[in-house]
Image (cartoon, helix red, strand yellow):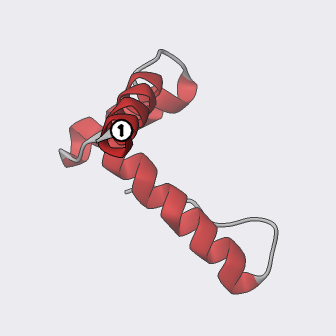
Amino acid sequence: MASSETINTGKEKLNNWLHEKNYFTDVLDKVEKKTGVNRLYIFLGNSINFVTQTFRTGSNLGVLVFL
C-alpha cells in the first residue's frame, strides 16, 4: 500500500500549498467561494487544460481558464 500512501501525501502537500497565502491562492479562494468548487479541483482542471492546449496547438503556452 505504499503507492496509495504516496498519493495521499502528495495530495496533502498540494492542498497545503494551495492554502498558503499569496496572490495566486487568493484568486483561487475567490473562485472557490464563488463557485463552491474545491480549489484543488480548480487547480487540477486548469493544469490539465494547460497541458492539453499546449500540445494541441503546438505552442509553448496553454490557456488557463478560470470560471
Q: Nearer the viewer, residue 49 or 1?
A: 1
Q: Position of residue 65 (x, y in %)?
A: 49, 61
Residue at the image point whose x is 43% and y is 35% from the top: 10
Relative to 19, residue 60 above or below: below
Residue farthest to the left, as pictured: 36
On screen, residue 16 versus residue 64, left or right, reads: left
Q: Quadrant of the C terminus?
A: bottom left
Residue at the image point whose x is 43% and y is 26% from the top: 13
Q: Is residue 65 visible?
A: no
Q: Quadrant of residue 53?
A: bottom right
Callout count: 1
Q: Residues within 10 Å of mark 1 (few under 14, many from 20)?
A: few
Three-letter code for the amino acid on which mark 1 is drawn = Ala
Q: Position of residue 61 (x, y in %)?
A: 75, 65
Q: Is residue 11 visible?
A: yes
Q: Position of residue 15 (x, y in %)?
A: 37, 30
On screen, residue 60 versus residue 54, left or right, reads: right
Residue farthest to the front, as pictured: 1
Relative to 14, residue 4 above or below: below
Residue at the image point whose x is 31% and y is 43% from the top: 4
Instruction: Give the labeled residue for mark 1.
Output: 2
Q: Position of residue 50 (x, y in %)?
A: 59, 64
Q: Nearer the viewer, residue 49 or 4?
A: 4
Residue at the image point whose x is 50% and y is 64% from the top: 48
Disc 1 is placed on an element classified as: helix
Q: Quadrant of residue 18?
A: top left
Residue farthest to the top, as pictured: 21
Q: Quadrant of the N terminus?
A: top left
